[in-house]
Image (cartoon, rainbow, N blue to C red):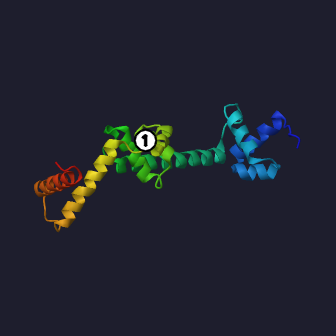
Amino acid sequence: MAKRKYSREFKLSAVKLVNEQGYSIVEGAKSLGIDPSNLRNWLGKFASEAGAAPTGEGAVQAELRRLRKENARLLMERDILKKSGGILRQGAAVKFAFVRDHRRDWPVVMICRVLQVSRSGFFAWLKRPASKRDRRRRELIEKIRAAHRENRELYGSPRVHRALLIDERWSVATRWPG
């Protein structure tokens, strides 16, 4: 399929149709029989030229669209910051865990930008296997919860600690008699 060429005057008139007469990009492109992406590109290219800058009703609508988009972005950033609490002071792993837990609420790109971590770092962190220390910590947390449950959730930290020590001595004694 041959690529159509448009004259500079045609492009400028198309841009003025959107800017001055208040047409949306899709409406303007449809009325001229061109692709909306072409018109969008021309708007960016000719925006700074005299006579092509938005004026009148089209300018108000364009500014309103821009402000609404910016407002939505700022509200999203505010919500992320409210939800994240003190995470900005934490390490990357804590921030990445927050991104993982909230990526269904907001775009990953936005969360990473607000928390000042890289998106590629987040996805690399997701694929990385848990460290030995992490696995040991999770195992210990499970043992603590089990000891607490087994004692009708009445034991506090000193008794849970004692129960874990007794359990650990028993398991060591059964594995390595001596």
Where is residue 158? Give x, y as percent.
10, 54
Q: Which residue is mark 1?
A: 114
In this rendering, the answer to whether 88 lies above or below 139 is above
Query: In the image as oriented, which residue stretches furthest toward the front?
Result: 178
Query: Does any portion of residue 136 appear in the rendered image?
Result: yes
Q: Is residue 73 left or right of residue 86?
A: right
State whether residue 53 is above or below residue 29.
above
| x 86%, y 37%: residue | 5
Left or right of residue 57, residue 81 in this image: left
Quarter of the image holding residue 132?
Answer: top left
Instruction: Using the image as rendered, state which of residue 75 and residue 141 is in the foreground.
Output: 141
Position of residue 11 in the picture relative to residue 114 (left or right): right
Residue located at (74% from left, 45% from top) = 17
| Residue 39 in which image quadrant | top right
Q: Could you classify mark 1 by the number of other residues whose Cα lies within 10 Å: few (under 14), some (14-19), or many (20 or more)?
A: some
Q: Residue at x 45, y 49 (%)?
A: 76
Indicate the secondary structure of the residue bearing disc 1: helix
Along the line of sight, the residue nearer the viewer: 80 or 100: 100
Give the percent coordinates (x, y) of residue 31. Answer: 80, 52
Residue 16 visible in the picture: no
> What's the residue type where badge 1 is placed?
Val
Give the position of the N terminus as an image quadrant.
top right
Q: In percent of the image, x 73 and y 41: which residue is there? A: 15
Q: Which residue extends farthest bottom?
A: 152
Spot occupied by residue 36 in the image (x, y as percentages of width and height):
74, 47
Q: Residue furthest right?
A: 2
Pick the residue in front: 54 or 119: 119
Task: Find residue 55 and report its horizontal and vertical position in percent.
Answer: 65, 41
In-front residue for pair 160/21? 160
